Amino acid sequence: MGSLAHLWQRLETAPADAAPRQEWRAICGDDFACVEGLLEANGRRASVVASPLPNAPDMRVVVHRKGTVVAVCDEGATPRRELTPEDYTLLHISPRRLRPAIANALGLETSTTPINGPPGGFRLGTWGVPGSDRFPVTFVAQPDTTALALTIRSVVSSSDMGMIIVTPTAQGWSDELREWVEARKGVLVPAEDVLDASGSGLIASDLWQGFIDRFARRNGIDLASPRRSKAKRKKRADRLGAINAVETALTQMARDRVALIRSRLRDEQGMPASLPRVTKSAIATAARVKPHVITRVFNDSSADGVRTLFTLVNDPQALWDSGFGRVRLGR
């Protein structure tokens, strides 16, 4: 099984983006075969293409009068080369193809409602067990966190039932948004956590069942069945180790930021109104854990300290007023 982290990140930051086949191949690496069937030409031609030489600048696409298409390097780093339609045709992830691929992987009843596609949202299908209602499952992708929150609130409010909302990653979620969805018996699900690449298609990861268990509890659904295998649970030591690693990383970030604030105040520059926001991706790098581990930690009932630290490091005044600001921390 492979990870499609780069694909989901692309859909998170630029959901309607299109690129030549070679660029998609570079994004997806060994898992390109899994993604290739989701790509669709958008009827346009790329204006630039990547150079075949390492570390060389992109090449400009030029169409000659006879219809020949060539790539030209204005800096002269790469020789001029003729292009085929496969080289310059722009492809995007087709929502029409993505929907059944995700629905089949997650065991959903595929929706037949019209698709507008991202940025925005579309119905993937419904989920349920025999004897229960069918609950809507919607895919939402917006490059802006404000637009993401507004879209999710809109689609959740459109139904009286609990809803499963799938987003490419969890980076755009705020604590407030997650709590708002949970209060309406819904659950937010990052595609990068619950979908893996296998062969030439998508399959559900081991984490999918955990999100379903959470959704079922909120909606009073009994999943007990002799045929149902229990989802693998992370060992307590592994779970606590991840929480400790994230808390340690956030503690160091808090110390670094207090040192920056102290320096500004010493130089009479005043308290900064804001600091560059600490993202969960940055935390994952500092804690040396995979991005999906951050999502699990922030959702863990034992990680109150992590959530408190995350709020502090993104609020300079609150951080300065906290214990971090009152201690010199050896600096």
Image: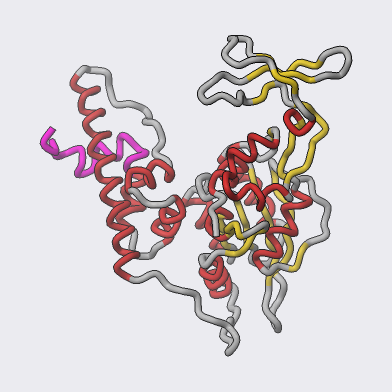
Q: Is residue 324 above or below residue 199?
A: above
Left or right position of 310 against 40: left
Residue at 66% across / 40% down in the picture? 15
Q: Is residue 196 magenta?
A: no
Q: Which residues are magenta?
A: 312-331
**Vertical placement of 303 versus 171: above or below?**
below
Q: Residue at x 38, y 30 (%)?
A: 274
Say above or below: 68 vs 114: above
| Residue lying at 21% horizontally and 17% vertically, measured from the top left | 267
Q: Is residue 323 magenta?
A: yes
Which quadrant of the structure image shows residue 83? Answer: top right
Q: For this view, does 287 lie left or right of residue 81?
A: left
Q: Residue at x 27, y 22 (%)?
A: 270
Spot occupied by residue 282 in the image (x, y as percentages of width and height): 39, 41
Q: Work out whether residue 146 can be spotted.
A: no
12 vs 18, nearest the viewer: 18
Image coordinates for residue 330, horizontal then vertical, percent: 11, 36
| Residue 146 at x, y percent in the picture | 58, 40
